[in-house]
Image (cartoon, rainbow, N blue to C red):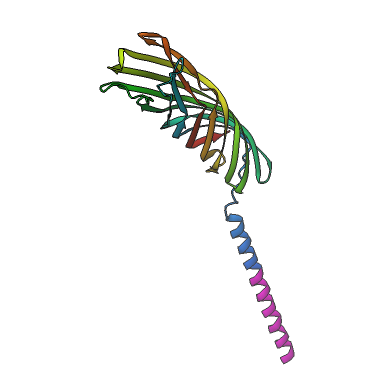
Amino acid sequence: MHTLLALGGWIMRRFRCAAFAAVAAFGFAAVASAAPPPPPAISWTGFYIGGDVGGTWTSNTGTWGLIPASPNINAISGGNGGSGVIGGLYAGYNWQFAPTWIAGIEGDWSWAKASGSFSQAWTAKVPPPPGTVTNTNMSSTLDWLASIRGRLGYLVMPNLLAYGTGGVAWGKIDYSATALCSGPGCVPTYSANAGSSSTQTGWTVGGGLEWAITNNWLLRGEYLYYRLNGGPSVVAQAANYPNNPSSFSWSNTNISVARVGLSYKF
């Protein structure tokens, strides 16, 4: 009888343990099923459009001289360095061709207002008479920039892209210049003025970081370096000196752009 009672107690203890384990497993499964599902993986593939704003810095070299070249008056060269605000629109397409690699193409157009100039007195092998005033001023102003670029990036994290970019670029630049000599050394006064505006072609390279805030909204910060080729050369007739015009020329233009942008991916 004692043996039967002990056996019955052992069976009851095992039954209670099994029942407790079953209840615990059921409760854990219920809690797990009630937990929110993990967020879906971010997809970078798709078209996007956005806007950006930032700063731009430009530089080129302006050169002035007389025609024909004077044996006494030296030619003048100076840098036209300037800075300003830039902002515009961009659009493109991303293709996530591997788990951590993104390729794409992008086009952008940006309005800018970055001006630079220099002003120098003439230098001569023989100093002019006292009271003579001379000056050459040359300037350039960047009006807008545009580019079509390829992009290649690597996902540092699922929602953070580090990328490089490069392609063809265009920009519109306005140029102006004056050359003046007055006083005892220039009787009558010498005055020449020039102006030019041109759309130039070049290239751009750069890179940046882009953060997928959500599956649709992308925030970026990037730097681009531009080289626009073919600064103009202008011959300007001088008042009172028809046989001695001024020659003004500008070099290629280098441009740096740092900007932030926000885009929507469809």
* x and y, in percent, of residue 95 in the image: 66, 37
> With 241 as the anchor, is 250 left or right in this view?
right
Q: Label the magenta part by its dominant secondary structure.
A: helix
Farthest residue, direction left: 131
* x and y, in percent, of residue 258 in the image: 48, 37
Span of residues in magenta: 2-21
In front here: 99 or 223? 223
Q: Residue at x 34, y 14 (%)?
A: 190
The N terminus appears in which quarter of the rendering?
Answer: bottom right
Tag count in the figure? 0
> With 168 as the anchor, is 58 left or right in this view?
left
Q: Quadrant of residue 77?
A: top left
The answer to whether 32 is drawn above or below residue 88 in the figure is: below
In front here: 228 or 17? 228
| Residue 53 on the magenta span | no
In front here: 25 or 247? 247
